[in-house]
Structures are given as structure tokens and as C-alpha cells.
Amino acid sequence: MTAQIIDGAALARSLRTGFKQRAESLAARGHRPGLAVIIVGENPASKVYVRNKLKACEEAGFHSLLIERPAGISQTDLLTLLAGLNADDAIHGVLVQLPLPAHIDAHRVIEAIDPAKDVDGFHVANAGALMTGLPAFPPCTPAGVMEMLKSAGISPEGRHAVVMGRSNIVGKPMAMLLLQAGATVTICHSKTVDLGAITRQADILVAAVGRTKLVTPNMVKRGACVIDVGMNRDANGKLCGDVDFAGVADVAGWITPVPGGVGPMTIAMLLSNTLKSAESHV
Ligand code: GUN
């Protein structure tokens, strides 16, 4: 293996220690940071993600509120719930875990979150702020990736960054953050022709597609930094990313593991955004 591993779990742990101190200082002044998480239905992966988010909140000394609703909840009831959280002074961050059941319009729900409490950074006001370079809550996963690059001493400036995936949660905001950091950015997606020809140009390759072992060693330039955002289960139910880790680690200069890579950083950035929100409400 030639690649250096960027250890997201260790980086997240060290960031969370700092967050805990900031939370304690806010709590001492009567402003404990508070995060509300809404989960609708019984999606097992969503339940695990939400549990991990709330656990991290508790460990950092935040106030956390878990709101579980059945898959059959009406959109109106969900919007009413959000209006209550928007008005609640003890809550600085509101997160609705996605995906939502098909009968609910996820866009309508996200737009009902107060942008000042939208710690996921999914509201159009925050997405637009990111696009135009104004301060905003950056979406947690891409923000976590930027922190990982920084920790590894990799500056995107002047580099070719290739983002695989065009979702609103990861691909698009990831491209924006890399662009803002001075990279030349290419976004690939399911309709891209000759994916490998593009990924082989990448100095920084971010895989956010959701397909096990999509990224093989022949798709990676020697010495590149490969960031794996994938969270998939293989045939044995084992958690794995979008990158063939063992193969690509022999070609890349840096690589992130799954688990223990981007996942813990997503949670750390959620805490960071919630703290930022709480600090701005003091
Ligand atoms: N579903 C998958 N990732 C996320 C995320 O970062 N936030 C929310 N709210 N839902 C998700």
C-alpha cells in the first residue's frame, strides 16, 4: 500500500473535544446548544445515522431532541412540527433525516425549516449562500471532506478535483466548496461517458455515488487523493464505500477508509453547524 490513510474518526474525535469545550462555555451562560432530529418511518440505515448523531450531541454536552413519527404522518403534521421547532429557543439546529416517505414532498419540508436553524445546509437560502460565497451552514458531508483535506495538508488550489455524484446532499455542494477553494472542478454522474478517462485526471477524487467498488485502481491517477463518501453494504452485509480500497490504496497518495473516514466527519460538522447557530443566537 502506498497511500496515506486520512483517519476521519481520529480527526472527528479531536474536533469534538473542542466542540465540547465551546458547548460548556455556552451552557455556563445559559445557552446550551440544542439539536432536534426528526425521523419519519422505520428505515434501518436512517435509524443508525440518527442514533449516531444524537449520541455525538450528548457526548459534546448538547441538548438533543429525538422526534420519531410513523411513516404515515401527513405532510401538514410534519410542517406543524417544524413550525414549533423553529419557534423553540432551546433548539438551534433542526434536521429532518432523509429520505422521507414518497407521499411527503421533501423540498417543501426542507423549505419549512428556518434557514438560521438549517444545520444540514439543505434549505435553498443556504444552498444559494454557498453558491454565492456568503457565510452559510455548509452541508455536513462536503464540509467534513474539506476538513479532511486540510488535515492532510492538501490544498485544492490549482488542482483538478473530480466529484462523482450530483446529489444536493453531497455532489453539488462538494463541487461548490472545492471551486471556492480554488480547484478546477468536474462533476461526473450516471450519464457521464467514459468515467475513467475523467477520473484519471483527478488530483482530488471524491466518490459519492453509492455503488460498491465502483472506483477501481485503473481509474485513479498515481498519487491522487481519493475520498470515499460511499456508505454501502456488500453481499455479506459489511459496510463498504464506493472505492475498491485495497486496490486503490496501491495507486493513490491518500485515501479515506469506510468505515472511519468521511462518516464520523459528517457528524462532527453537524455539531460544528449547531454550535455556530447556538453561538450566533447568544
Ligand atoms: N440522509 C443521508 N444523509 C443525510 C444528511 O446528511 N442529512 C439528512 N438530514 N439526511 C440524510
Image: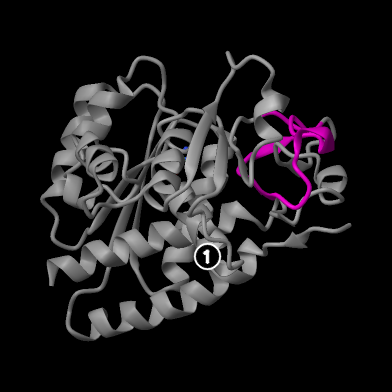
Viewer-proximal residue among 225 and 65: 225
What amino acid is labelled 1 in the image?
Lys
Viewer-proximal residue among 92 and 66: 92
Q: Which residue is mark 1?
A: 150
User: x and y percent of residue 122 in the render?
Assistant: 31, 39
Looking at the image, residue 125 lies above or below residue 10: above
Majority SS type along the magenta span: loop
Viewer-proximal residue among 134 and 123: 134
Q: How is the image coloured?
A: one colour
Secondary structure under the numbered disc 1 in the rendered image? helix
Drawn side of residue 100 relative to residue 200, left or right:
left
Residue 217 is a magenta residue: yes
User: x and y percent of residue 183 in the render?
Assistant: 47, 47
Please identify the quadrant where the C terminus is shown.
Answer: bottom left
The residue at 54%/76% (across/down) is 14
Please identify the quadrant where the N terminus is shown.
Answer: bottom right
| Quarter where residue 129 is shown | top left
Drawn side of residue 70 relative to residue 219, left or right:
left
Q: Is residue 85 visible?
A: no
The residue at 55%/36% (across/down) is 163
Residue stretch in magenta: 211-234
The residue at 52%/60% (across/down) is 155
Q: Residue furthest front?
A: 158
User: x and y percent of residue 86 in the render?
Assistant: 15, 47
How many numbered markers are drawn? Answer: 1
Looking at the image, residue 141 lies above or below residue 149: above
User: x and y percent of residue 84 in the render?
Assistant: 14, 45
Residue 231 is a magenta residue: yes
Looking at the image, residue 57 lies above or below residue 167: below
